[in-house]
Image (cartoon, rainbow, N blue to C red):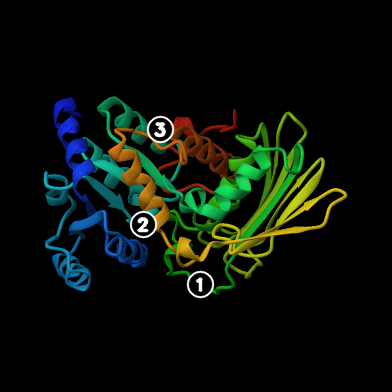
Amino acid sequence: MDLVDDTANDTIRVGRMTEQKVRWGILATGGMAATFTADLVDMPDAEVVAVASRSVESAKTFADRFGIPRAYGDWETLAADDNLDVVYVATPHAAHRAAAGMMLEAGHHVLCEKPFTLNVREAAELVTAARDGGRFLMEAMWMYCHPMVRRLKALVADGAIGEVRHVQADFGLAGPFPATHRLRDPALGGGALLDLGVYPVSFAQLLLGEPSDVVARAMLSEEGVDLQTGALLSWDSGALASVHCSIVGGTATSASVTGSKGRIDVPEGFFFPERFVLHRDGRDAEEFAADPADGPRGSLKHEAAEVMRALRAGETESPVVPLDGTLAVMRTLDAIRDRVGVRYPGEDADPDRAAVTPA
């Protein structure tokens, strides 16, 4: 289906959203969709009006749970629903390209879960579709929207620790996950990197941008997905980032940012920190703590609020989670997978997968 130029209708939509609640459609009914929807229904300026699943029974159960008026047993009916403003895509990530693409082609704005897609080729296709059609599109990288992460980024940008020299971040789960689990299934984009490693990589690139070189090693499963992966990212400035992810060992989920004049330590849960410590050379350590008014530490309300702010402003991209940044992270993830030899079904025949290297 071709994207339709619907500028006039977008003006009406933005005007309506300015005065009323933003109407959300939910695509998928799994755990992530439930977590996001639970936060949405508590937001006074949001309204969840429709949900779709591959099964009408699953959609109806989800709709009953959250008081959603319309439940669909297929994606196409949600795509054809004109009485909503934005669709949240929370399918398994191997289906993100198809699901988000269908919603964009139908003229909907989209928030798509991370990892954005399986690879940068698919990601670029979605970005092109959104930009050509004038639709809003954002990766649900909720870490970027978290108030404490935004505060950390601002401190670094303001020179609190001088020039960034090194970033460290890790995210690992103890498991064990059986071979039948989605995290071990190549057809579902399984492995530690896309599910967990996207956070350390995104954290490093939030502060340093896209690396100029990537070195990586991994332990692979019999199915051919990565059980744990470590990567060293480097920049022309001389900065380095050490990132690690695992589904065979629980890690501290810590992070640190070392600069020429100090360091910031995030003791645990770096992607939704309750606190971090700023060490400036020659000064006492300063602890920064989350504001209780920001809500529970795992809240997804901040990313939902950013989407609604952008829609009301008539923006098609978020400056907090920019699409060019999402593409840059996908290039790095592709480069890491190339280095460790992880391929998903259909990728070997894709000429664009050859020798992926960050810019």
Q: Residue at x 34, y 61 (%)?
A: 36
Residue sitting nearer the eye, 142 or 242: 142
Which quadrant of the rendered structure holds the C terminus?
top right
Say which mark, if any, is on residue 177: 1
Query: x and y percent of residue 86 in the render?
Result: 24, 46
Can you see residue 102?
Answer: no
Q: Amino acid at mark 3?
A: Ala
How far is mark 1 from mark 2, CA to CA?
17 Å
- The tag earlier along the polypeptide, 1 or 2, is 2
Query: x and y percent of residue 349 in the render?
Result: 43, 37
Mark 2 touches mark 3? (CB < 8 Å): no
Tell whether 190 sits left or right of 270: left
Is the residue 210 above or below the residue 245 in the image? above
Which quadrant of the rendered structure holds the N terminus?
top left
- The tag earlier along the polypeptide, 2 or 3, is 2
Q: Which residue was labeled with disc 2? A: 92
Can you see residue 274?
Answer: yes
Q: Residue at x 60, y 41 (%)?
A: 205
Q: Quadrant of residue 240?
A: top right
Give the number of the mark in front: 1 or 2: 2
Mark 3 touches mark 1? (CB < 8 Å): no
Density class for disc 2 (Cα within 10 Å; few <14, some 14-19, many ≥20) is some
Q: Residue at x 56, y 57 (%)?
A: 271
Is the residue 291 above or below the residue 175 in the image? above
How far is mark 3 from mark 1, CA to CA?
31 Å
Numbered disc 3: secondary structure: helix
Numbered disc 2: secondary structure: loop
Q: Amino acid at mark 1?
A: Phe
Tell whether 211 sits left or right of 85: right
Q: Which residue was labeled with disc 3? A: 124
Q: Amino acid at mark 2?
A: Pro
